[in-house]
Image (cartoon, rainbow, N blue to C red):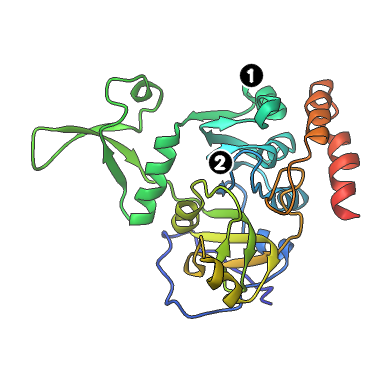
Amino acid sequence: MNDTLTGARTAPRTPRDGLWRDKTCTLDTAIGVLRDGDLLGLGGLALCRSPVAAALEILRQGRRELRLLDYIAGFEGDVLVGGGAIASVQSCYFGLDVLGLAPMYRQAAERGWLRVIEETEATIAYGLRAARAGVDFLPVRTFAGTDMLSVRPDLRLVGSPYSDDVYVAVPALVPDVAIVHVAQCDRDGNAVFGSAASLDVDLAAAARVTILTAESIVDTETIARQGADLLGMYVDHVVHAPRGAWPASCMPAYNADFALLADYVEACPRGEFDAFLGARVLAATSA
């Protein structure tokens, strides 16, 4: 286990040499690489494989002014917004599945406490893939003639050097730190998601530092038999975090706790976020 970690911010990651390494460490040590103001990429898909344990540790460590990149954000992002850790959000949807929009996100957005950067599934996907390819942008045909160009002035028209075609340039998204929760991984970070992959491979590959939290850490042969969804070459730190997605789900181990989440949705508009988080979430995860 390595409890002395650093995270460079000067350039996108370069592929590792492929040698197997033991990258395990404690959750507090892994989250210690995150700095105030970082672009934080969170994996999962709404209430599926949400890195909730990592989000709670971010709050515990008192991070502030983070820029949240969360493809389809859920409970993990909402507790960060409610806890005052987030300055801006890039997400194509921010909610709790059948329970509607995430309450603390909605409150912060409506009251102007949060900068909301318009995204679509495609802009996030193209941005991560540009970063993964090591280029500044990807030229795409999508969005030409839509309002996206007016709400996102960084999406620019570029001409093809080979024809008269005009494309929209989608800028690269390079998270300073990405956190992905998985069902299983080995100590090197070769992982099996166990459920929807979302954009987590692109997220892990694009980030400067990638942290995996895992329900269980198993031997490499176990991962190989199933087929790895994510390779360790894109992972820097591995944390054993059983039930690390609760009260969201990590199938097949457990489903989302919809009863608790329904109570959360009712409590937040009453100004009870802190009390609920302490009594119903933190107390349960520390028991």
Which residue is at the far front? 225
Q: Are marks 1 and 2 in contact (CB under 8 Å)?
A: no
Residue at image location 44% in from the left, 50% down from the top: 174
Disc 1 from disc 2: Cα separation: 19 Å
- Where does label 1 land, which residue? 110
Q: Quadrant of the N terminus?
A: bottom right
Query: Image quarter for residue 266?
Result: top right
**In the image, is 119 to the left or to the right of 148?**
right
**Left or right of 25, for residue 260:** right
Q: How many marks?
A: 2
**Residue 49: mark in rendering:** none
Outermost residue, left side: 163
Residue at the spot 34% in from the left edge and 24% down from the top edge: 149
Q: Nearer the viewer, mark 1 or mark 2?
A: 2
Q: Position of residue 181 (x, y in %)?
A: 63, 55
Query: Can you identify the residue that label 2 sits on?
Result: 70
Give the residue type that dot 1 points to.
Answer: Glu
Horizontal and vertical percent position of residue 165: 13, 33
